Every structure is written in structure tokens, then in C-alpha cells.
Amino acid sequence: MSFMEITNLCVHYPIRGGFFNTVVDNVYAVDGVSMSFEKGKTYGLVGESGCGKSTTGKAIIGLEKVTAGSITYEGKDVTNERRKRGSSYNRDVQMIFQDSHSSMNPRKRVIDIIAEPIRNFTTMTPDEENRRVNELLAIVGMPEDAKYKYPHQFSGGQRQRLGIARAVACKPKLIIADEPVSALDLSVQAQVLNFMQDIQDEYGLSYLFISHDLGVVKHMCDDIAIMYRGRFVERGTSKDIYTNPQHIYTHRLLSAIPNIEPATRKERREERLRVEQLYREQQHKFYDKDGKVYPIRPLTETHYVAMLPTGEGE
Amino acid sequence: MSKTDILLEINHLSTSFRIKDDYFAAVDDVTLTLRKNEVLAIVGESGCGKSTLATSIVGLHNTENTKVDGEINYNNQNLVQMTDEQFNNVRGAEIGFIFQDPLSALNPLMRIEQQIEESLIYHTKLNKEERNKRVIELLQQVGIPNPERTAKQFPHQLSGGMRQRVMIAIALSCKPAVIIADEPTTALDVTIQAQILDLLKALQSETGAGIILITHDLGVVAEVADRVAVMYAGQVIEEAPVNELFTNPKHPYTRSLLNSIPQMNTEGQKLNVIHGIVPSLKNLPRTGCRFASRIPWMPQDIHEASPSMHEVAPDHFVRCTCWQRFHFEEESDVV
């Protein structure tokens, strides 16, 4: 059963211009996105830069204004009450940011950073709070004396782990992870991903994992949505997406991922060029005349794709 | 390989930075060769000295607080000994450089054509008309759809992929024999990355240039490189042809790195994590195997006292002897 549902979420930015500075057009950053979240699952959101994946994440947590659509959390419509103090949504949905450096106040010590959500949402005595912070630091594998340091005293991977500790401080139900490992080196990235999985097992969290790295997403996610120009082009379990991709855009993304098998690179290059050719030829089949993706429709129970039913539009 | 194929020979190169009154080597005793028509990839994590190596080759370091030792032989000249004036004739003309971030490497106040023309003015005797022709030709060569229009535009009007193409056009403008590409695709999307890598390959087969590709992405390496050098803490710790490196990695660091890549088939498994962190420049162990502290479960006596490169297979070199007995951490190793 899903505990949270997003229906037809839209975020449009008006473009103003003309004589009276009226709205002349809109930027359709997110244009009708629907998802539902189940407990303990990881949802991947993939796309190239500028496709609206980060905006979707921010809109869900309440950092962006929603133009249309609704967010239902545990049966209640919370679309316009997401950032209200004391609302349980506010506590249960947390975020891990891409850039750990700019997401932490440089003048606060680690203890104040991690305890901030605790102070906001719970009533703990300083003693209990202290114990909880120690607990959190232990979870992400940091020593206790890290508490009295400042964010700049840590390396990128350590800071990202502190970001995770802050996100799980109030035992949330959903964590939105916006490119949590993109800025990290390979070995550190492995460490952070492992921590995220451990924490998920322990608390039964759900993740919305936003990334452009299809290898990482495949490793982490149960369900994957591919996004293009504010819309989903394909959605399904990771098996659906990786073994049976339907949309040409998904094909194109998958064929462009570098693989660590140098022996087959010639074949993969040819495959890539073939898909690229197809992509140019079959534009009309997959995009309408404004270059927009068609509405998404179900193919199987779990697999959705934005294509016209076969026979139409050809 | 015959001797004549060798374009660039780096011998025992060390680049040290001054911190207060001491010099610390960020690149320590690196020996590499680049041949014609070859892509030599240099891989490593941040802080391993790969970019320092690249900037040392083209002499972009501030001489006041950097010390470069060893030799870089290009065309019977030693680049390390060159004066700035001599270097200016090599840099840009015979060694092209592609920077990681095209937005900060391009001048925001100059039109694209002016920026490409700049190196033509400096290094060639072409007149205005010929230069214009060459600019358009270059833009066409790097796959820009409307070169006449793009030539008149400013960098901010172009997309990231287009800017990187312009960077490549600048690097190629004087038909260099050596191209150094420092993380050329790191800031780009995968589809654009694939296009840029294809472009580099295609241009190479046209000109026969040698490319030094610096990257942290092992996927990119597998995609384009011919030979790979893996760097750790300022040293090259393994060097091998690309197929050999990926099918038969030897050094514990290379094996750990390959094992920590989230791959298409690693779902549900734990990724390999390397113990500890990369030591900072000041705290680098200067003696013994530099990777020893990252594999604490292995006994100390498997390392050499002063690790050197050993040839374990044709063209495959590994530093230190610890690879012979190395195994990944097991339950029984946890103390």
C-alpha cells in the first residue's frame, strides 16, 4: 500500500514580457507527473540536466510552488500545507542535497546541524538530544567528537554522511535524495550508497533517488522513472526499464552509458550510432508536433510508457 | 613499438608545491610515454595528482611556489628546462589542451571566432581571410551545425556540449601532435559525453595525434583508451593496455576501484568500500607502499620497502609486490 501519492504534479514558471509585463508564456519545468510511494522502496528519477528531475523533488518537499496537481499523504491532501510548522508531512519527508557543502550552515557546529530537525519537531531534553546525536553519528560511521567540529573540517564524503544523519534524525518515512553521490569519488560513493541501504533496512525508509547516473540508479532502485522535458517518458520496475525499454529516449540513454568492458566497445559504439539514427528518424512516433512527450499509458501492470498506441501517429 | 612512434616521454617527473617552507610532491616520480595515434588514459580519484601532471606537461604552474623535476621530452627538447618564451611556441601549437570546464576556460567577452583565431594569430602566419576560413573549417570539423552563426556568438549563448566542442576546436586549431584532455566530459550528460568521445576518436584518426585523457571515470576509460595508467597519491601504481587492465587488474587499488563501481548487475549487493581516506599532500607516507594504510588487514611484510614498477605481463606494469598475495577483506580479517 502506498502511503503517499502524487497526482498530475505541475510546476510552471511564468515568462513575463510585453508592454504591461504580462505573462506571455510558461516554462513547463514539471508537467503532469504522477507517482506513488510504498514503504521501504527506492524510486529512481533519471534524466539529463534540465529535464525537471530536481524541480520535481523540490516540489514534493515544498521548496517549489506547485502550479497544479495534488500531493496526498496518508489519505490527506497536503498540497498547500507542506511547509506548515507542526505538520507531520514536514517531519516525515526529508531531503539529502547534492552539494553537502552549501547545504550546511558554515557557522554551526555539527551537533547543531544534526540536532536542528530534532529541536524543530520533537521535545527532547538536551541530554536526550545529545544521546540521539551520538546515535546518529554512529549510524553513519562517524566518531563522537565530530559533534564539535564545523562542516569545513570534513571531507566531501564525510559531509555527505552528515547530511544523511540530519535527514534521518526524526525517523522520516521518505527521503528525497537529490544527486547524493554525484560530487563524490568512486570509493567514497560506494561508502555513501552502502550507508543509504543500511539505513533503509533499519528504518524501512523510502527513497526518491534523483540522479543522472543510470548505473547508480540501477544499483539502488526498485522502480525507475525516466524524465524528459518535465514529463515521464517511461516508468517501471528496474527490470522493465533495463531489459525491456520501449521508448526511444530510454534506448538512447541506455546506449550512451559507458561500460567497463573495453572488449565490446566497438559493438556498443555501433549500437549507439544505430539508436542515435533511429532517434532522429522516429521523432514523430515518440514526440508530438511541439516536441513534447505523449501522455504516459500503461503497457503492463508495472510498466508505463509515453507512446501512442501502435498504429496511431505513424 | 618502434622508437620513432614515441611522441612524448615523461621521465621521473616530480611536481612539488610549496607549503610554508617545505616542498611536497603532488606528482612523484612519474614515468610515462605517449605514442602516435594512441589514447593514454590517466585515472585516479581526486587528489591523486592527475591534473597536476597534465598542467606540468604544458608548464602552467606558478614557478614561484612549484618545483618541477625530471624531464619531459618532446621532439628532442626537454619541456621542463624551457623558458616561458620558448614554451609559448610549443604550447597551443604542438600541444593542445582541453580544459574541464569550458565556461570558465572561455573568455565571456570574446566571440567564439576571436577565441579560436587567437592561437592562429600567435602561432601561424595566416592572413585575416585565411584565418576566418580556418575558423569555420574547425567549427565544422568538431560538428557544430551552423558554424558561420556560432562563430559570431558568445560562449554563454551556447550549450555545454557546444562549448566543449569549441574548446576542442581551439585545442585543434594549430594541428597539435599531442592533445591533453583534462576531464573533457565530466560536466556533460551521458548522451553528449558519448558524442564528444566519438568526436575525439574521429579527430584522432584524422590527424594521428596522441591524446592524454585525464579522467576519474573508468567507464570513459573503457570506452576510448588504448593504454591506461592508474594513479594513486602522486604515483603511477599500474599501467597496462586497456583490455588487460579491465580483465586482469593486479594492484589492490585498481581491483578495489573496479569493485566499487555500481554496475548493471550489482543490485542488492554491497559495494566494495576502500578503508580510510586518501592521505593529504602533507601527510603522504613518503616511504613504503602508499596504499598499505588502506588495506590494513594485509600483513606488512607483503609490501616492498621502496616499491618500484614490475613488469608482470607484456606492457603491464605494477608497483610494489603486495598484489601477489592481496585478497579482499573477509569476515575473519575484521579485528
Image (tube, helix red, strand yellow):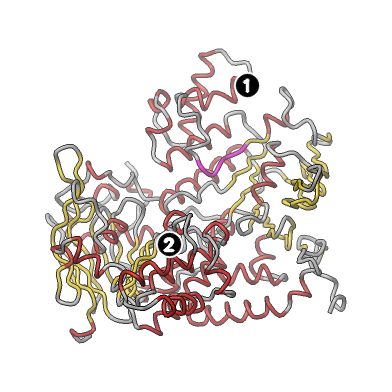
Instruction: Check residue B217 in the rendering and tell me which mark sits there, or answer none.
Output: 2
Give the vertical position of B63 relative to B219 (above or below). Answer: above
- Please indicate whether residue B317 sits to the left or right of residue B148 in the image: left
- Please indicate whether residue B249 sits to the left or right of residue A82 in the image: left
B327 within the magenta span = no
- Please indicate whether residue A149 sits to the left or right of residue A116 in the image: left
Task: Identify the element where label 2 is drawn.
Answer: loop
A96 within the magenta span = yes
Q: Name the image quarter holding residue A143.
A: top left
Could you tell me which residue is drawn at 42 percent across and 80 percent down? B130
Image quarter where the N terminus of chain B lies is bottom left
Q: What secondary structure is the stretch in magenta mostly built from?
A: loop
Q: Name the residue under label 1.
A: A120
Residue A49 locus on image (x, y percent): 60, 56
Could you tell me the amino acid type at mark 1?
A: Asn
State the extent of the magenta-drawn residues as a range: A95-99
Could you tell me the amino acid type at mark 2?
A: Asp
Could you tell me which residue is drawn at 20 percent across and 87 percent down? B2
